[in-house]
Image (cartoon, grey):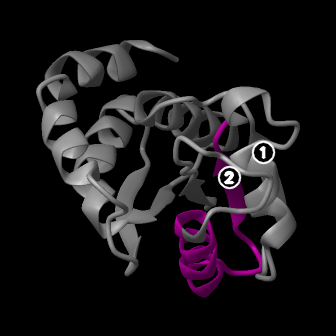
Amino acid sequence: MSRLVAVLGYSDVGGDAAIHPVCAARVARAEAEAGSDDVVLFSGWARRGRATSEAELMAAAWNGMARRHLVDRGARTTLGNAIAVGRAARRLDATDVVLVTSRWHARRASVLVRASLLGTRARLRVATSDEHMPGAHGLRELAAWSLVPLLALLAARTR
């Protein structure tokens, strides 16, 4: 039995070199979820040519237990995060996946991750952090939902 704890990155337009408070809250939530036998995946890219990716910043901030860390620097979107989770779950033959993201992002992210896990035996559980949605992201989340059916098909087809 293998369990994957997947922590999704976040950055805003400014994207400074420090870990974003949203990412820090997600890391703290993941630390509360992860055990010593778990594999933790940090997923997120380096916005605007920044040298350090969200995934690397989250991995550096990690103070929890884990058997192993995976760092995915390439995911630029929630779809990219979902595909990274699906690929890691397949490599690990994971039976359980814990998706760690923000409450306001969880529903959309979980739809895409579930699609990416099709054909695996992994069960998905979502653990959310409690920080508030930054700025005007409510409209962005609402608009992103219009693409979810198409993105879920892409996630399901990408192995």
Which badge, 2 or 1, comes first in the chain's sequence? 2
Decide: is 155 above or below 8.
above
**Quarter location, residue 45:** top right
Q: Are marks 2 and 1 in contact (CB under 8 Å)?
A: yes
Q: Is residue 36 magenta?
A: yes
Q: Is residue 102 left or right of residue 57?
A: left
Crowd tier of the residue under label 2, counting other residues whose Cα lies within 10 Å: few below 14, some 14–19, many 20 or above: many
Magenta part of the protein: which range?
A: 22-45
Please, what is the three-letter code of the amino acid marked with disc 1?
A: Val
Please tell me how many numbered marks the rendered image carries.
2
Expressed as whole percent of the image width and height from the top left, the position of residue 10 reads 54, 51
User: Where is mark 1, residue-wise?
Assistant: 71
Amino acid beneath label 2: Leu
Of 145 and 134, the residue lying toward us: 134
Q: Quadrant of residue 107?
A: bottom left
Q: Residue at x 77, y 80 (%)?
A: 36
15 on left or right of 153: right
State the separation of the CA atoms marked 2 and 1: 6 Å
Image coords of residue 108 (percent x, y): 25, 45
In reply to whether residue 121 is colored magenta, the answer given is no
Q: Is residue 53 left or right of residue 106?
A: right
Residue most extreme to the bottom: 32
Q: Classify mark 2: helix, strand or loop.
A: strand
